[in-house]
Amino acid sequence: MKRAYNFNAGPSALPLPVLKRAQEELLNFQNTGMSVMELSHRSKEYDAVHNSAKQRLKKLMNIPDTHDVLFLQGGASLQFSMVPMNLLGKDQVANYVLTGSWSEKALKEAKKIGKTHIAASSKEANYTYIPRLEDIQLSENAAYLHITSNNTIFGTQWREFPNLPVDLIADMSSDILSREINVGQFALIYAGAQKNLGPSGVTVVIIRNDLLERIPDNLPTMLDYRTHSSKNSLYNTPPTFAIYMLSLVLEWVEEEGGVKAIEARNKEKAAVVYEAIDASNGFYAPHAEKDSRSLMNVTFRLPNEELTKKFLEEAKEKGFVGLAGHRSVGGCRASIYNAVPLEACEALAEFMNDFYRRFS
């Protein structure tokens, strides 16, 4: 069976060994005579899957005991609302750094809850760069500072994170587990799973335990972090199959050498594609400034729409999937998340080089 070169931005590529393992266990999980999708979420078999996923993530990301791991639903988009609902006090101000569409959406939801402040932004340059740390200006009475660690649409990524006297919150949906980070630096991290962690359907929240003490008591039960923390994310029926797949992906990361090895591979993959861009004498024009380039989403333009269309048509014929840029930006985008193999990036670079030679 021929597999596509999958550069989709999300849902995105999953490791082939994980898909094969899921296929093998689909009809009869651990001799239960049932699929994992059919197991009760109160059964000992599912309980082992659930807790294994949680402990593997803690180990791989070196999550300190000061933080808890939650498995929620609603995607990162629901977290845009849950974060301010839970953590924005009445007289406080939610601070946001704008680096793309998703941080704009997060800010939009926070404005519905309380006071907000834009601490820094690169919107004036169409989000081609990550603001400098020294340019971040906090408001008075800041409740937290929210950033989006990687910007899928514009292809930019934070290289280092703010270290300011305020709780740091990050949407890491598109680069969680792609590189080593100091989790202790963050008050809260959230991430939709469908890029590096597994299939769509589960959202990981890593929350510092003391934040639970400042949550107001008037929140709807399902929108209160305390509900899920106190019940080990089993207050209601969780997305059991998505969590099972998450556990398999984490097992795969372990077998591949952990996050450090994954990071090294991601840098190698990105270098291959960016080299094709940089060697094209401007034929492929990168959207992101060089010191803000993402290791996860490589964005670029061709000289005109006609060439872009031809590039995408030829790419599709050769088995490349998901290379069209986001509709709000245009151009092209290669999403090279953890499960995208180096061979796919090398094949893409070879195609880009050939296309450049023929049409430049």
Image (cartoon, rainbow, N blue to C red):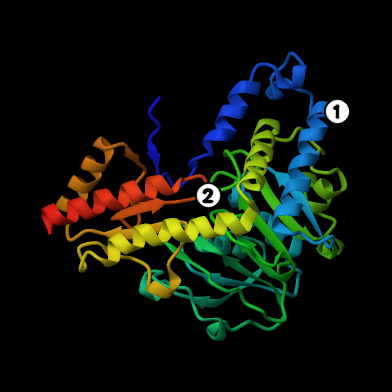
Q: Are marks 1 and 2 in contact (CB under 8 Å)?
A: no
Q: Residue furthest bottom?
A: 134
Residue occupying the point 45% across, 59% down: 268
Residue that badge 1 annotates: 44
Which circle marks residue 338 in the picture?
2
The amino acid type, in three-letter code, at marker 2 is Asn
Would you say 259 lies left or right of 91 here? Answer: left
> Vertical placement of 42 versus 193: above or below?
above
Q: In which quarter of the image is residue 142?
A: bottom right
Q: From the top left corner, tell me how far across and down residue 313 is, in percent.
A: 22, 41
Crowding around mark 1 (Cα neighbors within 10 Å: few <14, some 14 to 19, many 20+) is few
Callout in the foreground (1, 2): 2
Query: Which SS class for mark 2?
Result: loop
How far is the residue under mark 1 from the one under mark 2? 31 Å
Q: Quadrant of residue 128?
A: bottom left
Residue occupying the point 25% across, 48% down: 351
Of the pair 172 and 354, the residue shown nearer to us: 354
> Vertical placement of 4 versus 126: above or below?
above
Crowding around mark 2 (Cα neighbors within 10 Å: few <14, some 14 to 19, many 20+) is many
Q: From the top left corner, tell me how far across and down residue 216 is, in percent.
A: 82, 60
Would you say 137 lies left or right of 142 here? Answer: left
Residue occupying the point 69% across, 17% down: 28
Q: Can residue 153 be seen in this view?
A: no
